[in-house]
Image: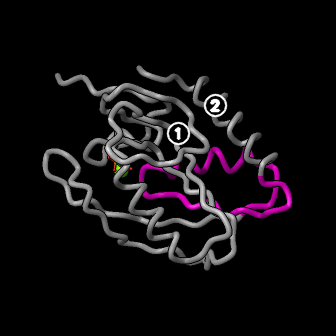
Amino acid sequence: MLIDEKAIREKVQEIGRQISIDYRNRKPVLIGVLKGAFVFLADLLREIDIPVEVDFLSIHSYEGTESSGVVRITHDLSLNIENRDVLLIEDVIDTGRTVSYIIDNLGTRKPRSLVICSLLNKAERRLIEVPLTYSGFTIPGVFAVGYGLDCDNRYRNLKYIGVLDNE
Ligand code: IMP
Ligand code: MG
């Protein structure tokens, strides 16, 4: 166990309240990065009390033992984000390669603003600096699962965030 259900709920409420204040009258677009962010996005959305729109994109990273950082979009947005205030919703930022690729890609579509909101932040593992506007929990460089995060597509359904025991 790394982060329990109650701590997650309270943190998600806090981020949702802050976004509601910061984005009043701006109708932001929340973009969830599939699949990991869908649980966080679903809960966060319901803690936001201003009008928002939701969209998703799906990415595939070519991985060996370590993430290579070569990423491509396998499912693109359905909304046009030109001149929109965009919040990119991630489950975890590790090296920063994935989110940095996505930010560059979305940036070419001329959003009015584009900020990152991540539930987890493995700050000490960062290889590429990324501006993190909303951050839930800073965690050590462990492999976390649960609450949407997977290991080989398992454990997404856990209500808490845990660390895999090698045994
Ligand atoms: P980065 O490109 O190294 O920042 O890795 C980010 C992506 O790798 C995330 O979107 C996750 O899909 C995946 N990832 C990184 N660390 C973890 C973890 O601890 N648990 C599950 N997935 C992770
Ligand atoms: Mg993932």
Q: Position of residue 50 (x, y in %)?
A: 82, 55
Q: Secondary structure at mark 1?
A: strand
| Residue ID for mark 2 | 11
Residue placed at 35% from the left, 72% from the top?
74
Tell me if mark 1 has few (under 14), some (14-19) or many (20+) residues whose alpha carbon lies within 10 angstroms of its own.
many
As drawn, the residue found furthest toward the front would be 129
| Residue 33 forms part of the magenta stretch | yes
Magenta span of residues: 23-52
- Where 62 sits versus 74, above or below? above
In this picture, residue 32 sits left or right of residue 158: right
As drawn, the residue found furthest toward the left would be 64
| Residue ID for mark 1 | 119
Tell me if mark 2 has few (under 14), some (14-19) or many (20+) residues whose alpha carbon lies within 10 angstroms of its own.
some
| Marks 2 & 1, CB-CB < 8 Å contact | yes
Residue kind at label 2, given as amino acid type: Lys
| Nearest to the observer: residue 166 or residue 102 | 102
